[in-house]
Amino acid sequence: MALSEEEQRRLDQMEAALEAEDPKFVSSIRGPRRHWHRPRLVLSVVLFAVGVTALVVGMDLHPLVSIAGFLVMLFGAVSAISAWTLPSATAAHPSAGPRHPSQTERDFLGRTDDRRRRGEDDAL
């Protein structure tokens, strides 16, 4: 169901306000951008096409040609899927060093440790 113009305008305003208030949170919610590794994608598509061709032609020639064509086609498909990659962390943030937990994460971890200790105390 599509949003009305008023609802879309309000949503855009809330998004802009959230991004202005906490840009780190917004970028963490959006997640890293993926991209295609083009040379490997082109090779994968070619392998897939060759595999399909060998699979079909192998039906007339010999079953082993069909099996080999299927394996080449499968390898091409898996290679194409793996060509969809995340940008490396060093390329995105060249000065990125070791990550330290934020105050919120430290608070959460502290509460979790407290609960775990209480659970161990109750068990004794």
Image: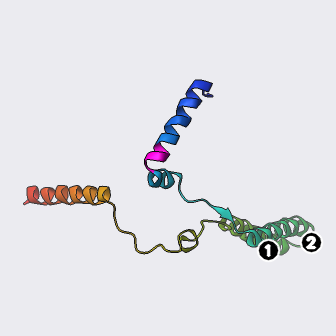
Left or right of residue 123: residue 10: right
Q: Earlier in the sequence, mark 2 or mark 1?
A: 2
Q: CA distance from mark 2 to mark 1?
A: 12 Å
Q: Residue at x 44, y 52 (%)?
A: 25
Three-letter residue code for mark 2: Leu
Query: Would residue 115 be seen by someone viewing this image from the given angle?
Result: yes
Q: Which residue is mark 1?
A: 68
Residue 19, x across and y down, in percent:
49, 46
User: Nearer the observer, disc 2 or disc 1?
Assistant: 1
Q: Residue at x 27, y 55 (%)?
A: 108
Residue 40, x across and y down, in percent:
74, 72
Q: Residue 13 or 124: which is nearer the viewer?
A: 13
77 over 8 or under it: above or below:
below
Three-letter residue code for mark 1: Ala
Q: Which residue is mark 2?
A: 61
Query: Would residue 4 be seen by someone viewing this image from the given angle?
Result: no
Left or right of residue 77: residue 60: right
